[in-house]
Image: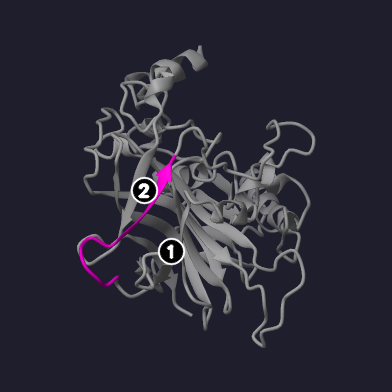
């Protein structure tokens, strides 16, 4: 029955609205909130956003201060194991054991047995990059945070993309483009892509996978900063604000924020090891153009018209270390994590015919008129 509903109602139809959790988390529906410890992982491949969204909904009317949040460097359910790594990434300490000892066990001991020792004021976050636990009065934190735009630009030739905190210069028609082919979609992890829940499957850690397999593709655009001369800390919600056009009548936009590790030291000597040149995805999310005005009533896109697309890449607490680079990637498929967009508007993509799937030229614009950027919450040093 669920498969049938997915096939018949890909939009946010009444059948989905009736199943939604959000209406049950309001002050009217839930005047009293039981003690709640929300737990999430920065690289949760199944639901990275849910714990933060549920925390925010409950926190808005948490008059008794019963709602808490812990976010760690984990995959889905990773907080239940005992490890200090995620794929190739080593966090230097067993964050899972620390979570249970410092937060989970004291929470239950306090609220079930009236024991002392639970001293979390609101939110605990494992800040990656520095690899340390941080505590905040609220999530996302507001004090000491400056929302800053990371602009997409070029070196002037339109062949190479640069990312910087100064607004893009140039004429109104500055853009970069690529051809998106539904017959050759960008994979979301290295091929071959194993069955999801089989032995040796990389599904569990794909969000922390090296993104260099995608960077070299002609249908993936990248913008990269120069090597940072100081640490940059991003703490809070990251937003994509992209001005784009497609030659089709529908499109998908995937935006990734990536930490590029150095491949040589400050003396110019090559770095040896698995993390040399590694491209670690910090945030990422997809947006389907047909839903730019409403998730309930999809509309076609006017071919070649420039539209602004603004959506959340969700939260992070990550430090881009000195010598690292900040990279932004844009692409129009993420297969098979998400179904292929025909790039021709049809009422229901689930019933699209083979002839509906067509190549499309996608353009990303950057100029004072069309200032494509990634809005990041920078924390004070």
Residue 144 appearing in the image: yes
Q: Residue 285's x, y, as percent?
A: 46, 47
Image quadrant in which you'd find residue 241: bottom left
Which residue in the protein does label 1 denote? Answer: 141
Distance CA(mark 2)–CA(mark 1) = 14 Å
Q: Residue at x 66, y 58 (%)?
A: 116
Is 265 rendered above or below residue 39?
below
Residue 10 appearing in the image: no
Q: Residue at x 55, y 70 (%)?
A: 319
Magenta-drawn segment = 168-180
Image quadrant in which you'd find residue 29: top left
Which residue in the protein does label 2 denote? Answer: 60
Q: Residue 17's x, y, as percent?
A: 36, 25
Image quadrant in which you'd find residue 221: bottom left
In the structure shown, which secondary structural element does the residue marked by tag 1 occupy? loop
Q: Residue 379's x, y, as percent?
A: 45, 72
Q: Residue 176's x, y, as percent?
A: 35, 57
Closer to the camera: disc 2 or disc 1?
Answer: 1
Q: What's the image's color scheme?
A: one colour
Tell me if mark 2 has few (under 14), some (14-19) or many (20+) residues whose alpha carbon lies within 10 angstroms of its own: few
Relative depth, front residue between 210 and 128: 210
Is 3 rendered above or below residue 283?
above
């Amino acid at each position: 029955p669920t498969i049938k509903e997915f096939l018949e109602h890909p939009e946010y139809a009444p059948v989905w609205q009736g199943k939604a959790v959000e209406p049950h988390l309001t002050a009217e529906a839930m005047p009293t909130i039981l003690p709640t410890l929300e737990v999430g992982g920065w690289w949760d491949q199944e639901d990275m956003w849910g714990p933060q969204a549920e925390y925010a909904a409950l926190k808005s009317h948490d008059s008794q201060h019963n709602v808490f949040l812990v976010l760690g460097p984990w995959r889905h359910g990773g907080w239940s194991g005992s490890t200090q790594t995620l794929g190739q990434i080593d966090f230097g300490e067993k964050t899972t054991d620390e979570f249970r000892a410092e937060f989970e066990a004291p929470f239950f001991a306090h609220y079930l047995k009236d024991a002392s020792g639970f001293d979390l004021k609101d939110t605990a976050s494992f800040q990656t990059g520095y690899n340390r636990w941080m505590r905040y009065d609220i999530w996302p934190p507001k004090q000491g945070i400056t929302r800053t735009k990371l602009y997409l630009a070029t070196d002037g030739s339109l062949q190479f993309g640069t990312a910087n905190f100064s607004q893009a210069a140039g004429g109104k028609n500055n853009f970069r483009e690529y051809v998106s082919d539904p017959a050759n979609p960008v994979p979301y992890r290295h091929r071959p892509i194993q069955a999801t829940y089989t032995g040796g499957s990389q599904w569990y850690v794909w969000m922390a996978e090296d993104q260099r397999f995608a960077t070299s593709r002609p249908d993936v655009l990248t913008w990269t900063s120069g090597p940072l001369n100081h640490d940059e800390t991003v703490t809070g919600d990251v937003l994509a604000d992209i001005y784009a056009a497609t030659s089709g009548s529908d499109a998908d936009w995937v935006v990734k924020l990536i930490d590029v590790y150095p491949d040589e030291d400050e003396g110019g000597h090559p770095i040896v090891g698995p993390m040399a040149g590694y491209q670690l995805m910090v945030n990422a999310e997809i947006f389907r153009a047909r839903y730019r005005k409403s998730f309930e009533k999809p509309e076609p896109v006017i071919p070649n018209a420039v539209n602004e697309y603004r959506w959340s890449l969700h939260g992070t607490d990550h430090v881009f270390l000195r010598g690292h680079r900040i990279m932004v990637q844009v692409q129009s498929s993420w297969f098979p994590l998400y179904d292929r967009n025909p790039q021709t508007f049809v009422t229901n993509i689930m019933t699209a015919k083979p002839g509906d799937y067509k190549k499309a030229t996608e353009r990303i614009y950057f100029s004072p008129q069309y200032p494509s950027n990634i809005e990041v919450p920078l924390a004070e040093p």
